Image (cartoon, rainbow, N blue to C red):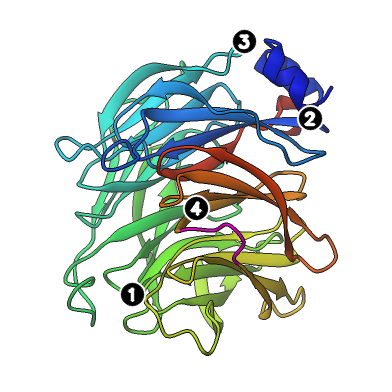
Amino acid sequence: MRMKAFITAAISIAALSTVYAESLPVYFGTYTSGKNSSKGIYRSVLDTETGELSAPVLAAEAKNPSFLEIHPSGKYLYAVSESGDVDTVSAYAIDPDTGNLKLLNSRPSGGSGPCHVNIDRSAKNVLVTNYGSGSVSVIPIAADGSLAEPTGFVQHEGSSVNPQRQKGPHAHSINVSPDNRFAFVADLGLDKIMIYKLDVDKGMIAANDPAFTKVKPGAGPRHFTFGADGRYAYVINELDGTVTAFAYEPASGTLTEIQTISTLPDDFAGSNSCAEVRVHPNGRFLYGSNRGHDSIAVYRIDPAKGTLTFVEHERAGIKTPRNFNIDPTGKFCLVANQDGNSVIVFRIDQKTGALEPTGNKISIGRPVCIRFLQPKSNR
């Protein structure tokens, strides 16, 4: 069954899981304030043979549901809400027949400007970073998928060298180690990757020893990811346009820098800020987004050393790529053009990692985040 059939017929999300080789549900977080804004969280379907996206449908109205994460069961979705008043994290049930979202409940994010949400690997807790206040919260997940009372909280302190962006802490993302023992928080304001011991049963985080690793002053670490085998990790630095590679020691949670490489051409002289970083499912390639240069930078990963070698910059149709994601098959990269009010699809060259424009595109006002609903058989 191909994409046109999904547009013209009402096919359930459960049915889509049975044809995983050809289709995949996708959810998009957006900004709902400002010019060309949207209305909340949208859904679509990706044809994993052609790269075509179905027309977006509003799955749930919400205020600035910028970043999303989907529960491993495929039954629930969690979204931060940058409301400006009481910033929250919300839990939604995913309707298996329509893909629409039903609000279960909301909890305070524990600070201002929540910007990233994740789920620990045992799916017991939602983890949230607050950019504005520079804080981190842990919120347990109840049996029905709703959010319980927050149990863990950490407030960062300090500053760094950039007087415009680093006067105080700005926790920008939180990621969990492959063994679920540690949580890593990239703090743009501190130029540090904070390292926490994670107790998933109690829903608590506590400073590790060592408590952090530093990046270059003024780099501004933003998003963080592990390599496919867990031996290496990578952070994209928003302010100075670089990616830093680390060797990871799982026993102690230690990160040791092994390389820092630019995301920009040598002759680029404009302003730029980086956003997302991702490793291809096959572990051989890494991608990072540039806002300003308006590109996705592509690198090859040395499997023995974890180091990066530049491949290309892809710019076709890209405008302020706040976020992007690679589908689980590894065939396509979807790019959210925040200022282009669109999501565009690239095919990934499986030998080189390079991105090839497909011409497939959908219109969504101010898209910020892309998440795939994977079939249960792959969970």
Rate crowding at label 1 as few (under 14), some (14 to 19) or many (20 or more) other CA atoms within 10 Å.
Answer: many
- Element at badge 3? loop
Name which residue type carries label 4.
Answer: Asn
- Element at badge 2? loop
Checking the image for residue 20, the label placed there is 2
Residue 34 in which image quadrant:
top left
Rate crowding at label 2 as few (under 14), some (14 to 19) or many (20 or more) other CA atoms within 10 Å.
Answer: some
Rate crowding at label 3 as few (under 14), some (14 to 19) or many (20 or more) other CA atoms within 10 Å.
Answer: few
Towards the viewer: 60 or 112: 60
- Element at badge 4? strand
Q: Position of residue 236 (x, y in %)?
A: 48, 69
The residue that mark 4 highlights is 323
Q: Is residue 317 magenta?
A: yes
Between marks 1 and 2 in the image, the one whose residue lies nearer the viewer: 2
Q: CA distance from mark 1 to mark 2?
A: 41 Å
- Element at badge 1? loop
Q: Disc 1 or 3, which lies upstream in sequence? A: 3
Q: CA distance from mark 1 to mark 4?
A: 21 Å
Screen quadrant of the N terminus: top right
Q: How many marks?
A: 4
Q: CA distance from mark 3 to mark 2?
A: 16 Å
Checking the image for residue 97, the label placed there is 3
Left or right of 125: which side holds 6?
A: right
Q: Disc 4 or 2, which lies upstream in sequence? A: 2
Checking the image for residue 98, the label placed there is none
Rate crowding at label 4 as few (under 14), some (14 to 19) or many (20 or more) other CA atoms within 10 Å.
Answer: many
The residue at 33%/25% (across/down) is 148
